[in-house]
Image (spheres, rainbow, N blue to C red):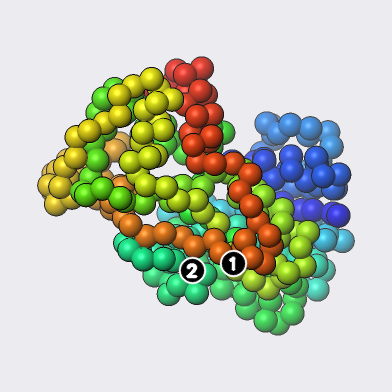
Amino acid sequence: MKVAITGATGFIGKLLIKKHLDSGNEVRILSRKENLEIEDLDKIQVFKGDLNDRETLLSFVDNVDVLYHCAAEIKDESLMSVTNVEGTKNLIDVSKHKIKHWIQLSSTGVYGPVRTGTIKEDQVYNPINEYERTKLISDELVLEAGKKEFFAYTLVRPSNVFGYQMSNQSIFQLVKSIEKGLYFFVGSKGSSANYVPVENVIEVLYLTAINPASKNQIYIISSWTTIENFIDTIAKALNKKTPKLRIPIGLVKFLARLTSFIPKNPLTVARVDALSNRAIYDTGKVEKELNYKPVATVEETIEKLVRFVKNNKKHL
């Protein structure tokens, strides 16, 4: 199988490369970077360029069986439309009738901040920020291309992906707050921790490539536990006491707004909402149609992450 990957130098992309190389597949990647920190680089075909480089894209997708579109701008809002929307348009334009299967790394963020209930693939879309809006537009472009039969498609929508290899600092900051005894629970017990181990996301992406049942489908991938169990697992891995303090949501939001002017303030209204939501992402569809079974648990992934933190104190 010939596999092409955009966003291959990212957290998920690097592990996806390894998965396909280990499976004996031919892998090519698209990257603008000169120095690529990727294992087995000598086994990979590298195309230098970006999503606006049409000539490079034409070569990149030529004779490809599976194209994974994992590239996205997640930090700089001013670049999100160019990368997430225009970049996808360009890639679709060169891929139509050339590739067999387009697999898009999407996000449950397109459903917006759902506070309660069970979220399935047909949940109403409600993106509230630039990243979520541009990701949804990107998804809709792929769905439209699929309807025109340019190629088969699959959209994979993970919740909060985590693992010790991640560059996002949110989980490391959470570990830091527990390490220093600063963490407190928000609201009543039983809130959701919708984090998914990166290994499980890689497994679903791979299954969509090898299982014909995935074609022209959308799949949510997530794991669920209570925030209490999530925090308790971190505390135990740190050999610290589990936090006991619990503060009402209203008071915490007031404090978040009051301190919003502080640079890099970890206490934000969005984070308060995330720590107190009770929604659950349903993975029944991917389990039934692709016979997906988790390859890593949340607890195992937390333990690996904390071990990494202990060995790399720069994160604390």
* Residue at image coords 64%, 71%: 217
Lower position in the chain sequence, tag 1 or tag 2? 2
Is 18 located above or below residue 294 in the figure? above
State left or right for residue 60 relative to residue 257. Answer: right
Image mark count? 2
> In terms of secondary structure, where does tag 1 sit?
helix
Residues under numbered marks 1 and 2 in contact, where contact means CB atoms less than 8 Å apart: yes
State left or right for residue 301 relative to residue 18. Answer: left
How many neighbours does mark 1 have within 10 angstroms: few (below 14), some (14-19), or many (20 or more)? some
Q: Quadrant of residue 246?
A: top left
Name the residue beneath numbered marker 2. 120
Amino acid marked by disc 2 = Lys
Residue 286 horizontal/vertical position (percent): 62, 63
Which quarter of the rendered picture does the C terminus lie within?
top left
* Residue at image coords 26%, 48%: 189
Name the residue beneath numbered marker 1. 285
Amino acid marked by disc 1 = Lys
Q: Can the viewer see residue 160?
A: no
> Is residue 263 or residue 278 the one in the foreground?
278
* Residue at image coords 45%, 72%: 123
